[in-house]
Amino acid sequence: MQSMIVSDKLLAKLENSIDSVTLSQVRHTLNNLAPPDIAHQLEIAPPKYRHILWGLVDPEVSGEVLHDLSDDIQLEFLNKMDGAEVALLTEGLDVDDVVDILQQLPDRVIPEVLKAMTLQDRQRIETVLTYSEDTAGGLMDTEIITVRPDISVDVVLRYLRRFEEIPDTTDNLFVVSRDDTFLGNLSIGKLLTSSPTTTVREVMNTEFKAIDVNLIDSEVAILFQRYDLVSAPVIDQSRRLLGRITIDDVVDVIVEDADHSLLAMAGLSDTEDTFSSIGRTAPRRAVWLGVNLLTAILASSAISLFEATLDKIVVLAILMPIVASMGGVAGSQTLTVVIRGMALGQVERGNISWLLSKEFAVGALNGLLYAAVIGGIVSVWFQDIRMAVIIGLAMAINLMAAALTGTILPVILRSLKIDPALAGSVILTTITDIVGFVSFLGLAAVFLV
C-alpha cells in the first residue's frame, strides 16, 4: 500500500509540471526508497516518465536498481550506455548479478564492458559467462568462503574475523581439499556451537547436496524446494568447487518460470513490459494472432465438410459451439496439470501410462455426465431425442479426446524440444475444435440426413 501511495505521488508530480523544484522533490522521494522499490517505481511508470526517473536515481544504487528491473526495461536502459558506463554501474555487485545484466547485452558489447573492469572482476565474470544462463553455472556466484578439513573450529572463527563482511546469505562454509575438491559443508550453526578445539572434519556434513554446474535452472529450483536449501555449492564433473547458488537467485528462477508459463500460454514473451510502446507491443502480439488465425481456418475447414448437413438442419449451427467449447476447457485443465507436473519434475517416462489412464478415465466420467446433462437440455429445448443423443455422444467423444490430447501433447512437444506452455494451448484448442465439430456433424450427417 505504501509503495502505491509513493507511486501515485511521484507520477502526479511529473504529470503536473516538470521543473527543477519538482525534479528535486521527486529525486529526494525516489532515493529514500530501497533499490527494489525504486526498480518497482520505474517499472510501473509509463515510458515517457521512466527515463526521467532513471536519471534521478543515485549513482551509488543505480547498479542494484538496474539488476532488479525486468529484462525488457534493463535492455531499454543498457542500450543507451557504452561499455565503460555499464562497468561503472555494475561495480560492487555480486558476480551472478553482474552476469545477469551482461547477458542482456549484445555479444559484441560484452567485451567492451569486461575490458573496462578490473582484472579480478573480469576473471570472475568470464568464468560464469562460459555457462549458459539457464544452468547452475549461469546462476552461481563465485564469491565463496572455503576451509580445509584438518583445521580447528577456533582457526575457522579467527579466519572469518579477518573479513570486513561475509557474502550475503552465507549459511554454510564449504570444505575443500587442497585441489579445491568439494568434501562437504560446515554450517554456521554447527560452527558456533562446536568446541573450539574440534576439527572441521569432525563436524562437517559430507552428505550435503552439491549441484552439477550444467544442471538446468528449473531443476536447481526443484532441489532447493525439496531439500529446503538456502545456499548450495556448484561443482564440475571432477567435484571441483566452482561457486555457490543462493536462495535469492532461485526465487528469481521460480518467478521467471511462472511468468513464462503464464505469458507463453497467450503467445507472449516472458519479457513483456506492461507499459511498452504500441510500436513494440503490436508486432509481438500480431505474430501469435496470425498463428491462431491459421488454426481457426483449419477448424473452419473441418466444418465446411458438412456444409450440406448444416444447410438442412440449422439447429446444428446453434449447438455446435457447445461441444467444441467443453472439449477445449477439459483439455486445458489436463494440459495445465501435466505442464505443471513437468515443471515440478513429477512427470516422467515411468508414470506417463498411469497418468494417461487416469486422465482418460476422468475425461470419460465427465464426458458421460455432461452428455446426459446436455442431452436432457436439448431434448427439452428442441423436442428432438435424436439430436439429444447425437450431441451427447459428441460431447463424450470430445471430452475423452481432450483428456488424451492434454496428456500426450506436452510429452510429445517436450521430446521435440518445443515449449509445451507456448505451443500446447493452440494445438490443443485446434484438436478439440476439430474433434468436436467432426464428431457432432459427422453423427448428424449419419443419423439425421
Image (cartoon, helix red, strand yellow):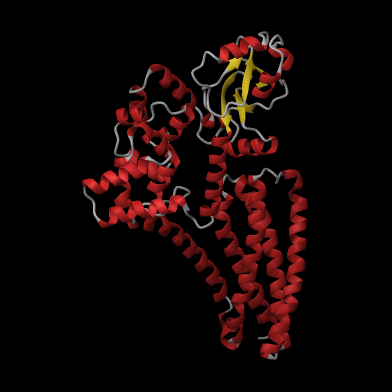
88 to 336, vertically: above or below? above
From the viewer's side, name the closer residue of 273 and 366.
Answer: 273
Percent from the top left, x then y, of residue 228?
67, 35
For image coordinates 65% across by 68% down, the residue present is 327
Percent from the top left, x then y, of residue 272?
43, 51
Q: Does residue 238 appear anywhere in the picture?
A: no
Would you identify the image quadrant in which residue 313 lies? bottom right
Percent from the top left, x then y, of residue 181?
63, 15
For image coordinates 68% across by 11% down, the residue present is 196
From the viewer's side, name the closer residue of 244 and 375.
Answer: 244
429 to 146, vertically: above or below? below
Count of numbered marks: 0
178 to 59, vertically: above or below? above
296 to 220, vertically: above or below? below
For image coordinates 70% across by 45% down, the residue present is 346
Q: Does residue 18 appear anywhere in the picture?
A: yes
From the viewer's side, name the closer residue of 62 and 426.
Answer: 62
Would you identify the image quadrant in which residue 99 lies? top left
Furthest-left residue in this view: 19
For image coordinates 23% across by 47% down, the residue present is 21
| Residue 437 as seen in the image, left or right of residue 128 | right
Quarter holding the C terminus?
Answer: bottom right
From the viewer's side, name the closer residue of 124 and 63.
Answer: 63
Percent from the top left, x then y, of residue 366?
74, 68
